[in-house]
Every structure is written in C-alpha cells, then in structure tokens.
Amino acid sequence: MDQNSGKIQKDLEFVRETLRTAELYHSATAIIGFDRETICPKKAMAAEGEVSAFLGSQAFRLTKSDEFIKAAENLYQNRDLLDELDRVMAVQLHRRYSKVRNITPEMNYEDSLIRSRAYENWLNGKRSADFSVFAPSLREVRDMFLRNDRLREEHSGDPYDDFLDDHERGVTQADLDEWFGRFKERMIPLMGKILKSGKRIRTDFLSRTVTDEQQRKMARYILQVLHYDFDRGTFATTEHPFTNSLGRDDVRITTNYKPNQFTANIYTVAHEGGHALFEQLQPREHLEHFIDSGKTSGMHESVSRFYENVIGRSPEFISLIFPKAKEIFAEQLSDVTERELYEGVNTVTPTLVRTEADEFTYTFHIILRYELEKEIVNGRCGIEDLPGMWNRKYREYLGIEPTNDREGILQDVHWTFAFGYFPTYALGNMYNAMYYNRMKEEFDVPAAVLAGDFGKINGWMAENVFRRADLIPPKQWIREICGRDFTPDDYISYLEKKYGAIYEI
C-alpha cells in the first residue's frame, strides 16, 4: 500500500468513526424531538428544546473539527479512488460542509434555539388562531436562513434556488414555474368542469362520529396491510403528523384522530407509512456508509403519496380494506357500499386545510405555498401581510377563504424549520405517476393491490425506486426508473382519466 492509499484508508476509518458518534447524538435529538411532538408536557418543551439543541451542537462540533474536515476533504479530493458508496459519502460530506464551513458551533446552537422557539410560537399561535404570535419567529427563521445562505461557499446567487436545491437537488424556480404552469393550465379548467358536474357523490357518512380507539385499530390495520415492520417502528399521535427515523432500526410515524373525519387518519397513516417503508426498505449498506440521507424530499414525498393516493385511493385498495373497515366502523358504515366509500374518499371538494385536501385539489395548496415562499424569501412582502395574501390566493385558486389563522396560514409547521420544502409534495405526485406507469408495464398492479400482495409491490419499489435514491440526484433517478426525462404530464393525465371517470365528464 503506497503512502497516499494508506492516508486515504486512515482518513476513511476516522470519518466513519466520527460519523458514527455524530449519529448517536442525532438519534438522541430525534428521540427528544419525537417526545416533544407527541407526549411532552407543555411546560417541559422549552427545556427539552435546550437539551436537543445542546446534543445537536455536539454532533455539529464533531463534524466541524479541523481533523474531521481535513480527512473528509481529502476523501473528496481522492473520491475517484474510492468505491461507489464511499465516493457518494465523500461527495455528500463535501456538499454539506460547503454550506456550513462558515457557520460556527455557537451560531449552529443559536439556530437550533431559533427553530425550537419557532415551533413553540407556531404551536401557541395555531392554538390561539393568531398569526401575530408566530410572525416574529417567522421573520427570525427567514433571516437566519438568508444569513446562512450568504455564508455558503457555493451558492446560485438566488437564495430561494439554494433552498430548493437543499431539498430537491438540481430543481430551480424556473423548473417549477414551468411545471406548475402546465399543471394550472390543464387542471383549473378541469376543476371547473368537476364542480359543475351533475354527478352527486355521497359524503354524509364521512363525518359520522368515531372513537379514537376505532381509529387506532384502523391505523394499525392499514400499516399491517402495507407491510410496515412493527419490530422496527411504532406509531403515536401528534398535532401535525410526521415520520422520523430515530435510528437504524427505529422508524416511527405519527397520526392524529379527528372524531368526525375518520378517513383523514386512514390516509395520514398510509402517507406516513409510505415514508417509513422508504426508510425500512432502503439498502442496509447505505446505513453502514452514512449515505442514507441522500434521498431528496421529492423522492420521499413521491413514495408517501404513492401509498396514500395512487394505491390507497384506488378502487382495488378500497375493496381490500372494506371488510375490515365495516368491522371496525360497524355502525358508521352500516348503510355504505364499497362503491360509495371509493367515491367518497375521492370526492373533489375545495377545502382550507392542506392535509385534509382531496387528491385532485392538493397540488393547488402546494403551488399557493410555493408562490408565497418566494415572496417571503425574496423580501417582496411584509411578514405581517402574509395572512391577507394567503387568503386571497385561496380565493383565487380554490374559491374559498379561511375565517381564521388556524385554518389558514398557521396550519402547517414547515416554516418553523425550512423553506423550499413545500414544492416537493407536488413533485412527489408527479414522480410517482411516472413510476406507477413504469410499474404497470411489468405486472398487474391493481390485481396485486386487490390481492393484498404488498410484498410484490414493495419489492418492486425497493429494487427500482429505493435502491438508488441515496446515490443520485432526482432528475437522473426518475430517468433511470422510467427510461425518460421528468415530465408533469403523467400526473396531469392520471388526474384527467381518474376524475373524468368518477365525475362522468
């Protein structure tokens, strides 16, 4: 072994050892984060936030040490001499380091506190339906992101493009403006036709009162159907549902129970279950090489919304779960047919809350947020003006308007910790429509759903969708899966076909 090879091997071992220690700190902060958003007492939240910030700062210090940086940068400079997975790790570390090289541990600690305060103020503002409670934190978070963007060594010159790239590598505002513009061009007229359709869909049973225990049973059943591994995860309730990987064999999801919206829990669980399957079924060697965070947000949202909508709202899935639903919700579904349940969960009704939106109108909620984010980041609007802008855009796109901030601008937690995330939900819809069409070329997917054969479906996803997600950027990823470049047209056509049939137009 020559001197250079020996140095590379020594650096590789040191980087892996340091990342393993940092991973332990991150796992601890994730456990605290899960506790804060599920069962933490209200008066303990600030203290837990401080503990989480401290632990996170320790991990940050490890990967900001001169020794670690020199070793990681040496691996990056010699990446062509590494095997594929170590090369990906070196590239990811360099990409990450270029963003934080000029962020001191003290600044990182303060940033953690800013996010923690923002979450508390968002929660309090939502509970009181008062945006003014959260507004100072939103301004603080925005300013923090802009400051950190200026400190990056590599940036595009447009902060919002940088934030988009953080979540969806290689995707820009120019891309989104084109793709979302094509969506609006075809979907706004179709929504008008649907809302004017003479087809009447029965929905009265969807608001019948159910118990939390009934919903808990249904949630567990849905996860079992999807083959979620309960030996490596669990589920709980929270204000805003999420999925979090707390460790290599600990992927947890959350939901919430609304007494008069029992299907919301079903689809929340299917959505979060999709996120969890992505983590549980990823290649084990990616964990061993510390590259399991290479998946983009859009990749992840494509999977969660694939299980939630493409599979979960299909007639075959409704047929599969209908007997169990009738058993658990015996009184509430006593006079409901399978077809009525299918049409009920696919009814198109503009609503104020994104997480309760139907599959068809959902993307309008995302486009609205994307357009406001650009204004916030680019400073083209005052923070205090946002509720009014939010309400006007809801009226423009969906013909409805919030009556308070809780059901309006305070409904989502995302602006407490990120900008540029929201568009990935819409991209996820567009990605999964493409790979669903590819999957159907290889086997009869509806028949597999009807038979409950999620081993086959998940196996295809693991091989084609999950296997390379950590390794390559999204435009290359979708091209490898489908054999063609990204387009929003598959998703647009999917909606046109599905809802044209349901509404007989």
Image (cartoon, rainbow, N blue to C red):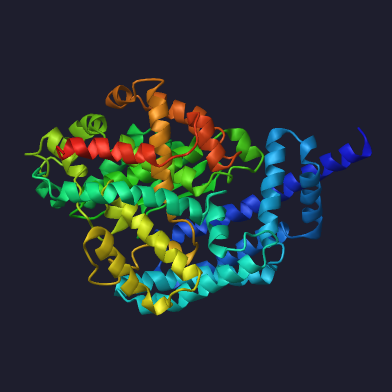
432 lies above or below 175:
above
Instruction: State whether residue 256 appears in this view.
Output: no
The percent position of residue 40, horizontal first and vertical second, equals 42, 64
210 lies above or below 491:
below
The percent position of residue 193, horizontal first and vertical second, equals 17, 47
Instruction: State whether residue 62 appears in this view.
Output: yes
| Direction from residue 479 to residue 18 in the image, left or right | right
The percent position of residue 299, horizontal first and vertical second, equals 48, 43
Residue 111, image quadrant = bottom right
Who's the residue at 25% across and 65% down the image? 395
Who's the residue at 25% across and 29% down the image? 316
State which quarter of the image contains the N terminus.
top right
Q: Residue furthest left?
A: 335
Nearer to the camera, 10 or 349:
349
Q: Residue furthest top?
A: 443
Q: Residue furthest right?
A: 3
Who's the residue at 26% across and 39% down the image? 496
100 lies above or below 9:
below
State which quarter of the image contains the C terminus.
top left
Residue 382, image quadrant = bottom left
Nearer to the camera, 382 or 28:
382
368 lies above or below 181:
below
The percent position of residue 112, horizontal first and vertical second, equals 57, 67
Who's the residue at 40% across and 67% down the image? 41
Q: Give the total of numbered labels.
A: 0
